[in-house]
């Protein structure tokens, strides 16, 4: 399995380091040290900037940096990923929507249902998310209705997740694994992106997602809190804040597990979803069962009616035979889990054939590893992992000679002069 184990440097930074090796005189020793830290192939390229936002390609992966107000972040997203947003949402909403799809036990024409649910959920959704979607629509040229409908799609995701820590790992480090399973034939993996967001007045965070989506189902913030989601049932109970926006709210506002849980406790919820939330500062993690009417907490080493096997210092969420396999693997490696063996917990068949992405977080250090399904639909679990570190990504700056796209300032002024967003 190919692993990119070290944070990448830009070509400019790599050259700077190489010069410092020569100037320092300790050529062989320092060069060997450098080589162990910075792989020669692990370079980054700035693709474009837009206001305070910018897009780069790191180790072959798209990394989008957005910063500012909700509208500004949405505009940067839509401008810098315009082609990806257009292709992604057009395919989902105008190609896949022509055929019936399965949602739970139902087969439906999705677009009319999605539009109705989005309208129902509008009164529960904070204005800031609609402002961000408006910015995305203005910059990408896509219709606002399509942006809103597209951002409903994450409500349908199914997944697995786990957190292991303390006695379960070799050095006590907390690892949080997240398996996202959904139909690879929706081509989401062709528009995969790591978004590094610095919201005005909020906590910076990373969101492993797809072009055109502003919500989150997989993320970690700069306060060392990580979260992943697993879909359940309860279809029809849509009167609440969309799941992906609740996860996004955790990333923007929660600096510990307790505050993360409060986001779910204090907001109206929809359907049934499960979450793993972890905090690298305290090595604390919990599983959540969140329906429209109940919120249950499962702590490490505890059982639940749907999770009958207790494993010390572990929170394990999945379903059916995938859950049994996850428990078996965790027990077999208990006390010896590290960043490599923790990734292997997510191998097939814990990951489904429809496995879109796998992510392993080490929240204490803000390191994380990401694998995406291939364009031909080969599951993420069978693809290379790429290593990142949130603190490194937040410290990065675009290359000074990068192509600059028009920023959101003028568009934002026009948007601010409009009527308040209707609820």
Image (spheres, grey):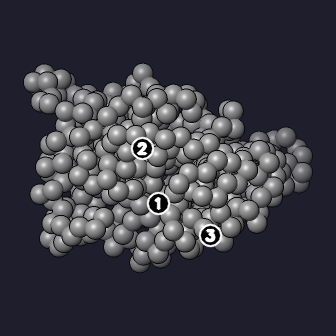
Q: In which quarter of the image is the N terminus?
A: bottom right
The residue beneath circle 1 is: 159
Instruction: Using the image, determine if residue 91 lies above or below residue 163.
Output: below
| Of pointers 3 and 2, the one earlier in the residue sequence | 2
Q: Which of marks 1 and 3 is in front?
A: 3
Mark 1 closeness class: few <14, some 14–19, many ≥20 residues within 10 Å:
many
In the depicted view, which residue is nearer to us: 279 or 83?
279
Using the rendered image of the protein, determine whether residue 111 is visible from the camera's viewpoint.
yes
Instruction: Using the image, determine if residue 79 lies above or below residue 97.
Output: above
- Label 1: state its secondary structure: strand
- Label 3: state its secondary structure: helix
- Where residue 84 sits, quadrant-wise, is bottom left
Mark 2 closeness class: few <14, some 14–19, many ≥20 residues within 10 Å:
many
Mark 3 and mark 2: Cα distance apart in space: 24 Å
- Label 2: state its secondary structure: strand
From the top left corner, tell me how far across and down residue 367 is, in percent: 64, 46
């Amino acid at each position: 399995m190919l692993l990119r184990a070290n944070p990448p440097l830009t070509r400019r930074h790599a050259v700077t380091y190489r010069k410092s090796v020569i100037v320092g005189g300790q050529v062989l020793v320092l060069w060997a040290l450098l080589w162990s830290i910075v792989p020669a192939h692990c370079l980054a390229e700035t693709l474009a900037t837009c206001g305070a936002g910018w897009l780069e390609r790191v180790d072959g992966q798209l990394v989008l940096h957005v910063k500012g107000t909700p509208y500004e972040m949405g505009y940067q997203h839509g401008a810098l990923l315009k082609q990806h947003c257009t292709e992604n949402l057009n395919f989902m909403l105008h190609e896949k929507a022509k055929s019936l799809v399965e949602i739970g036990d139902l087969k439906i024409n999705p677009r009319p249902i999605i539009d109705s649910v989005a309208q129902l959920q509008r009164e529960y959704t904070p204005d800031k998310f609609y402002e961000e979607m408006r910015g995305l629509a203005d910059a990408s040229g896509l219709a606002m209705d399509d942006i809103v409908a597209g951002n409903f799609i994450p409500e349908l995701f199914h997944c697995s997740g786990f957190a292991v820590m303390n006695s379960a790992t070799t050095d006590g480090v907390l690892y949080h694994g997240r398996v996202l399973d959904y139909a690879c034939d929706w081509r989401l993996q062709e528009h995969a992106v790591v978004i590094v967001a610095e919201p005005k007045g909020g906590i910076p965070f990373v969101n492993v997602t797809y072009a055109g989506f502003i919500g989150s189902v997989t993320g970690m913030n700069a306060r060392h809190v990580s979260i992943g989601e697993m879909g359940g049932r309860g279809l029809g109970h849509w009167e609440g804040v969309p799941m992906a926006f609740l996860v996004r709210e955790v990333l923007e506002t929660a600096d510990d597990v307790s505050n993360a849980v409060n986001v779910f406790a204090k907001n109206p919820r929809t359907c049934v979803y499960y979450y793993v939330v972890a905090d690298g500062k305290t090595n604390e993690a919990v599983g959540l069962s969140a329906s429209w009417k109940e919120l249950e907490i499962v702590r490490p080493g505890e059982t639940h009616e749907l999770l009958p096997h207790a494993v010390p210092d572990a929170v394990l969420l999945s379903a059916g035979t995938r859950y049994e396999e996850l428990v078996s693997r965790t027990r077999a490696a208990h006390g010896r889990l590290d960043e490599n063996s923790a990734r292997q917990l997510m191998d097939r068949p814990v990951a489904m054939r429809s496995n879109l992405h796998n992510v392993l977080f080490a929240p204490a250090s803000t390191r994380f590893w990401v694998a995406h399904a291939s364009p031909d639909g080969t599951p993420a679990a069978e693809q290379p992992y790429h290593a990142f570190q949130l603190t490194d990504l937040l410290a990065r700056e675009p290359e000074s000679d990068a192509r600059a796209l028009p920023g959101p300032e003028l568009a934002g002024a026009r948007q601010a002069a409009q009527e308040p967003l209707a609820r």
